[in-house]
Every structure is written in C-alpha cells, then in structure tokens.
Image (cartoon, rainbow, N blue to C red):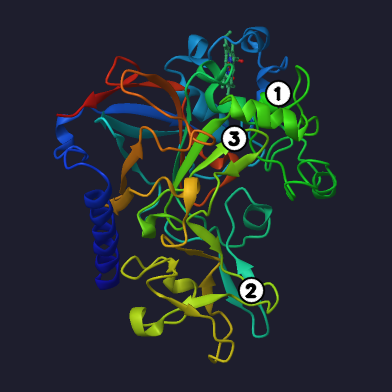
C-alpha cells in the first residue's frame, strides 16, 4: 500500500497548502457529510437515444413534444429502470449489448456551499470488484510499442476478443439557463447521430476535410455539440455555423460546462478535467491535467515509471489492476524519461497517458480539488468547485441563491462514448430549493 498512501498524502498536502494561501479559513467542505442530505439519482444506460432519434417517428408519440421542448421527465418520471432494461438487453437502441451491464446505477449526490465553493459528494458502486483505475497502455511487441486495451463498445473487444481496459469516470454538465432547452433535455441536447458509436458514424476523411472541425480544430471524429452551433432547425454535424458566429454564441454564455473526474487520468493528481460543449467537446483554455505519453518523432513513450520510486519501470497485463501500486504515470512523482535501452521484453506495458498537476494550467485546471477513493466496491468522490472560477469565457459562474441545471454521468466497467449511464437533467439550488438543494455551511 505504500505508494498509494504516499500519493494520497501528497495530494492532500498540496490542496491544504493551496487552501491556506488563497482562501479565508472558513472556506472548507462539510466536516461531517452525514449531516448533508443525500439524493439518489438513477442513472440509466442510454444506448443510441440521440437528439435526432428523439425527434424521429421512432420515438413514438413523443417526437413532436420533444421537438417543442417538453422535458424528458414530463413523460418519463421514475422510468429509469424500465428504459435502462430495454436498452441494456438490446431490445431498443443498442446494437451491441454488453453482457451483464446494469440497467441503472444509483448515484448518491450530496451538495453544500459557502460563499466561495460548491461542495459535491458522490458515491456509486462499481460493477467490478476492483476500481477502473487502469487505462490503455503501450505494449512492447519485441520491436515496437503498440496500443493495448479498448473500451467494451469497441469492435476490437466485442469482435476480436481484445482486452477491455478503460478508466472509470464521473462527469457533470452545468448550465445557468443560457442554453435553450438544456433544462428540459439535458445531456440529450449534446448527443447526436454521426458521433463515435452512434448511428450514421461520420467518416474520418469527411471530418478531416470539414472546413471547421477538420481544418481549424484538427479533429478526426465527431463528439458532443450543441444545436446552437449548427445552421438551421435540424442540426447535423456538418452544418456548422461560421467560427465568428460560434464565438458570439460562446461569448453570450451559450455553451454547456462539462467536467470529468477520471480514475486514471486525473485522480492521482487530486483533480478533474474542465471542458465545455459548443461546436465540439472541447477543453477550457490552458493545459489539461493529462497528456499523451508518446514521442511522435522517436515512436516510443515519453516516460516510463521510475524504478527507484515505485519498484518497476513497466508492468505486464497481470499487474495493471494491482491497486497496491500506482496505476498512473505521474510526471512529478513517479515518472522518468523513457530509456529505449532499458532491456525491454515482449509484453512490457507503459500507460498511454501521463498525469501532471504541475502541468495543468489556466481555466483547464480549475478543478484542482477533486478527491476520489474506492473502497469495498464503491467510489466516493469529493468535489470542490469554485462558484466563480474567474473564467466566465468557458465556465458557468454560479452564485448563492441561483439555480442551475446539471446532468450527471458515470462510466463504469471499461467503457467510453455512449457506454456511460446518464441522468435526466436536474436542478441544483445554491442554498435554495431545487431537485437538490446545496446546504449553506456556517
Ligand atoms: C411527450 C412525452 C415524451 C417526452 C417529452 C419524451 N419521451 Fe421518450 N418516450 C415517450 C414514449 C411514449 C416512448 C415509447 C414507449 C413505448 O414505445 O412503449 C418513449 C420512449 C423513449 C425511449 C426508448 C425506451 C422505451 O421505453 O421505449 C427513450 C430512451 C426515451 N424515450 C428517452 C427520452 C428522452 C431522453 C427524452 C428527453 C430528451 C424523452 N424521451 C422525452 C414519451 C416521451
């Protein structure tokens, strides 16, 4: 257990130091969370229930009302279990049902606030008897390093029997009322055909040659976007507004805040990432907490584990879920520059990404106090989010007395893209009544 404990203490010490320097003494999370009411939010498996599907005749008797902006819960209240079961079983909206996938994940949410921060505590049970702290790796094949590990919805896993390896995550989207229909449709406003693992997947070459997504943003696939970034009433991934028009929507707050606690790529640094959704799912300005562990020119990893600190340079498949040892490469803690002459053997594995709290900068580094621990089959994530991050250009600024729309998602059991469980949109009131009322501290 030594490295893990040391890791936790390092992060806690950094956070305490930051707290002491930058905020007054009364700004602190609840000393006793058992006094804060917990709301159980039922997250269900959404399959391919895209924005476009919801507006199609396949969404029986609901297509018109959904297009008019009636909220999902106005018709589907308490139907999470039922809908989840239809979809995980493959009866509806799911071309690749995953064996033993749960229909619903119960996410316990507690919320409190003071004048500086919103404090959220999340708890949920994992499908597996281990935390998803592993992520794809580079594996040495005797000559070169290649990727090993994919999410369960990837054809390499369901079609070719390759190993499913992907981190657990807890995500949230936030809006302050600036994005039309987010309060009613929540995450479904961002989820469209053409995206990865959705119907009518966009072709790589078409995305690469797209004047905005390919030529300006350098993307190869389509990810979440908001209808307000597209031309016309029937948004498609291709019909993007001009960069100037999108900038105007953004400047008026017409984006959704999106942030993710990542068990492999942010947790070891005591952080979550920080992004937003508008014309694409993008990261905030600055540097995010993780980076690709790959030296393109040399075609080899940038870092390997520091043997002096952790006792190994690399691992093998048998070791990547050993929770008594660090699972992530942390640039400032346990990593050293990769040595191509270290006597690599076939099957040696090094993480595909590294993590760095020191390297995280600017608005992308706003979630600097997010602590995740997994014990007895359950994740507990303590999240401190500044009400006002100081970055209104890509964050939603909250105020005491305000009510905001949140959408929650959990990625469980080696999954990405739409393989998560999601919530209906819900409101959080900062000290005022809402679906979840954040309790005022002091
Ligand atoms: C006007 C009422 C209404 C609204 C609003 C509505 N739905 Fe539906 N939804 C339905 C009905 C009716 C069905 C079909 C049930 C059936 O076929 O038995 C359905 C089916 C579904 C299904 C497929 C599972 C199933 O039970 O067949 C999903 C997923 C779904 N809706 C998601 C949503 C989401 C997400 C929203 C909000 C963006 C939404 N719905 C808004 C009425 C509604």
Secondary structure beneath label 1: helix
For mark 1, what is the residue?
52
Name the foreground residue: 150 vs 337.
337
In space, the residues marked 3 and 1 are separated at their CA atoms by: 18 Å
- The nearer-to-camera label among 2 and 1 is 2
Query: Residue drawn at (23%, 54%), measured in percent from left and top?
Result: 16
Q: Earlier in the sequence, mark 2 or mark 1?
A: 1
Q: Are marks 3 and 1 in contact (CB under 8 Å)?
A: no
Q: Earlier in the sequence, mark 2 or mark 3?
A: 3
Q: Ligand 1 appears in which quadrant?
A: top right
Quarter of the image for residue 160 reads: bottom right
Please give the label number shown on residue 373. Answer: none
- Specify whether residue 29 is in view: yes
Q: Quadrant of the C terminus?
A: top left
Residue 102: percent from the left, percent from the top?
Answer: 45, 38
Secondary structure beneath label 3: strand
In the displayed structure image, the side of residue 30 where residue 235 appears, left or right:
right
- Specify whether residue 92 is in view: no
- The nearer-to-camera label among 3 and 1 is 3
For mark 3, what is the residue?
277
Ligand 1 has an atom within 8 Å of the beta carbon of the residue at disc 2: no
Please give the label number shown on residue 295. Answer: 2
In space, the residues marked 2 and 3 are separated at their CA atoms by: 29 Å
Name the foreground residue: 19 vs 168.
19
């Amino acid at each position: 257990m030594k490295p893990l404990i040391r890791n936790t203490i390092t992060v806690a010490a950094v956070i305490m130091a930051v707290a002491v320097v930058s905020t007054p003494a009364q700004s602190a999370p609840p000393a006793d969370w058992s006094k804060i009411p917990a709301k159980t939010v039922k997250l269900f498996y959404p399959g391919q229930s895209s924005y476009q599907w919801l507006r199609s005749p396949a969404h029986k008797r609901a297509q018109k009302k959904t297009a008019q902006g009636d909220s999902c819960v106005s018709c589907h209240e308490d139907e999470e279990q039922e809908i989840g079961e239809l979809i995980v079983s493959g009866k509806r909206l799911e071309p690749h049902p995953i064996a033993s996938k749960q229909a619903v994940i119960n996410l316990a949410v507690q919320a409190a606030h003071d004048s500086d921060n919103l404090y959220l505590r999340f708890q949920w049970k994992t499908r597996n008897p281990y935390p998803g702290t592993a992520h794809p790796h580079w594996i040495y094949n005797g000559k070169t390093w290649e990727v090993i590990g994919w999410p369960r919805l990837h054809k390499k896993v369901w079609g070719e029997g390759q190993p499913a390896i992907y981190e657990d995550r807890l995500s949230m989207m936030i809006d302050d009322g600036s994005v039309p229909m987010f309060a009613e449709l929540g995450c479904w406003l961002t989820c469209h055909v053409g995206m990865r693992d959705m119907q009518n997947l966009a072709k790589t070459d078409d995305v690469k040659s797209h004047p905005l997504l390919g030529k300006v943003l350098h993307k190869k696939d389509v990810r979440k976007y908001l209808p307000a970034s597209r031309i016309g009433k029937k948004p498609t991934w291709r019909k993007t507004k001009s960069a100037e028009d999108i900038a105007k929507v953004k400047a008026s707050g017409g984006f959704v805040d999106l942030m993710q606690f990542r068990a492999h790529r942010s947790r070891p640094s005591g952080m979550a990432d920080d992004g937003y959704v508008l014309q694409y799912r993008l990261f905030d300005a600055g540097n995010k907490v993780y980076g690709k562990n790959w030296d393109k020119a040399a075609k080899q990893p940038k870092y390997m584990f520091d043997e002096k600190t952790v006792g190994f340079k690399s691992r093998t498949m048998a070791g990547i879920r050993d929770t008594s040892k660090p699972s992530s490469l942390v640039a400032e803690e346990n990593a050293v520059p990769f040595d191509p002459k270290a006597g690599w053997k076939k099957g040696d594995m090094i993480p595909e990404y590294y993590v760095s709290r020191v390297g995280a900068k600017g608005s992308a580094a706003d979630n600097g106090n997010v602590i995740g621990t997994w014990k007895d089959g359950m994740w507990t994530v303590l999240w401190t989010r500044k009400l006002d991050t100081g970055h209104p250009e890509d964050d939603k600024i909250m105020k005491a007395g305000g009510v905001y729309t949140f959408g929650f998602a959990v990625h469980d059991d080696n999954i990405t893209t739409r393989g998560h469980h999601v919530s209906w949109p819900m409101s959080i009131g900062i000290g005022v009544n809402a679906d979840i009322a954040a309790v005022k501290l002091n």
